[in-house]
Image: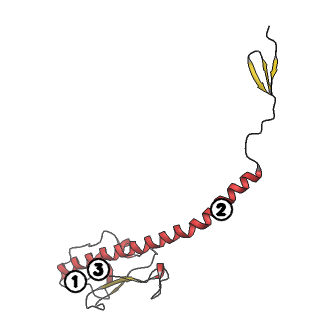
Amino acid sequence: MKIPFKCGNRNVANGVVYDDAKDDSGFTLLELLVVLGIIALLATVAAPQVLGYLGKARTGTSKAQISAISTALELYALDMGTYPSQQAGLNALVQAPPRAGAWKGPYLKKAEGLVDPWGHPYQYKFPGPGGGPQVYTLGRDNNPGGTGEDQDVSN
């Protein structure tokens, strides 16, 4: 027969240790509120930075897409002898315009490439300011000028 005995806050009976002290493990409400406040503070500081990077990424994507469209325009001009007319526009890179016997396209894989990262169609001018074709986007606000994500991007 084993006899229970007490050692500090612990009782030992039949080889099993029992803790008599109240179990104080876990977090208090105050500690949880402090941690949530710190997380909220970090989120408010970090969110503008993350959104700024997204804006720069969209602008970079539009530059890459305009470069790809410009390359497709050059291939079109090699086949057709001229760039697409203002009326035919950039759709001539995806779909053959009327009376386009030498057309060997599509020069772009899909028409979705003709829309900028903000969902606006790319603008096309021929002849552009330098005499060649101009492909551009007006940015997020779809208005001329602007800075950041609202800036115009052109080839």
Where residue 93 sits in the image (x, y, percent)?
Answer: 28, 77
For marks 1 and 2 on the same chain, the one whose residue lies earlier in the sequence: 2
Label 3 or label 2, whichever lies nearer to me, is 2
State how far apart marks 3 and 2 are (Cα).
50 Å
Name the residue located 31 percent from the left edge and 76 percent from the top edge.
Answer: 67
Mark sitting on residue 92: 3
Q: CA separation, marks 1 and 2?
A: 62 Å
* Secondary structure of residue under mark 1: loop
Q: Residues within 10 Å of mark 1 (few under 14, many from 20)?
A: few
43 vs 137, nearest the viewer? 43
Dot 2, crowdedness within 10 Å: few (<14), some or many (≥20)?
few
Q: Position of residue 18 (x, y in %)?
A: 77, 25
Q: Is residue 66 above or below residue 18?
A: below
Residue at the far top: name it.
Answer: 1
Camera-nearest residue between 15 and 106: 15
Inter-mark Cα distance, 3 to 1: 12 Å
Which residue is the site of mark 1?
99
Q: Identity of the amino acid at label 3?
A: Ala
Q: Which mark is residue 40?
A: 2
On the picture, is 43 further left or further right than 21?
Answer: left
